[in-house]
Amino acid sequence: MSIVDEVESRHASARDGGEVIYRHRVATRLTHWTWAIALFFLLLSGLQIFNAHPTLYIGKQSGFEFDNSVLSMRPMRNADGSVDGYTTVLGQRFKTTGLFGMSGSAENPSYRGFPAWATLPSYQDLATGRVIHFFFAWLFAAAFLTWFFSSLLSGHIRRDILPSLDDIKSLPRSIGDHLRFRFHRESRYNGLQKLTYAAVLLLIFPLIILTGLAMSPGMNAAWPWFLDLFGGRQTARSIHFICMALLVVFFIVHVVMIVAAGPFNEMRSILTGWYRTDPEKKEEHGA
């Protein structure tokens, strides 16, 4: 038995009869926090880049002569001459003054897709936004590759991420438990957690990295065919944005689940690796 296996097999009896197990390796914990930091800056700088042209399209081209937009956040003049911010999604228009399309005070309105507090830098500066975005994009990609290969070698992906047939069969129970905020602190992820983490780590993360690369001028020059895999630059940009939105939703749900399941135990596991299970169930955990 290796040293790592010996450490992972250690446990201490808790006062409530449960066990404290070693759940997260160092590589998992380091990449987790690297992603958290990188995604924060990627989100804010990405919205800065989006504001330079706050419309998303499907296809290889865009412009006034094309009718292929799927999302738009722009100021528009009303019939009475006033101006409001409007968000258009798949042809459906919504007034979003104060948040999307037009924000700021009535005396000093700002005509931009996302408001100043949601972008980095807060003022409109595409060049600085791109510099920040590209730096943290490479950091994010490096962390992903580190996690992927270390998890592949250690068996973490096979053991803890990819759902088994039994995990799929237990999905209704796992979903019901989570909806009722009924959590079981067990040593392994339940089916819903595995399915969620597999979607995020093995689908959304690679997709957001690849679509980002596909939009890179350097990549276009070296591999012009790569952009065609995603249906063109405009489609790649839309996929990139959708992946970002899904990650924001995942983050919000993830934080809510951590707080509901017991923040001290959950945070300790991702900071130190040690996690306290329930007294009776030690095969799977759900938080």
Image (cartoon, grey):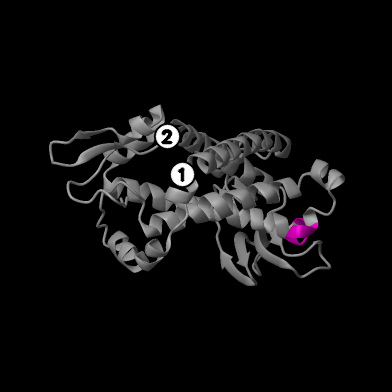
Judge whether 35 appears above or below 280 on screen: above
Task: Please report the bounds of the magenta region as a residue range.
Answer: 228-233
Instruction: Please identify the quadrant where the N terminus is shown.
Output: top left
8 horizontally vs 111: left or right: left
Q: Is residue 99 visible?
A: no
Badges 1 and 2: C-beta atoms under 8 Å apart?
yes
User: Mark 1 or mark 2, which has the lower sequence index?
Assistant: 2
Task: Tell me what residue is drawn at x 55 percent, y 54 percent.
Answer: 245
Q: Can residue 222 be seen in this view?
A: yes
Residue 25: image tag: 2
Return the residue nearer the eye: 153 or 102.
153
Q: Within 10 Å of the Cα at label 2, are there few (<14), some (14-19), or many (20+) other Cα atoms?
A: many
Return the residue nearer the eye: 19 or 70.
19
Could you tell me residue 145's position as x and y percent? 60, 39
Return the residue nearer the eye: 196 or 61.
196
Q: What distance separates the C-alpha of mark 1 from that of mark 2? A: 10 Å
**Dot 2 amino acid type:** Arg
The part of the image, by quadrant, that contains residue 71 is: bottom right
Residue position marked by numbered label 1 in the rendering = 156
**Dot 1 amino acid type:** His
Task: Tell me what residue is drawn at x 62 percent, y 66 percent.
Answer: 88
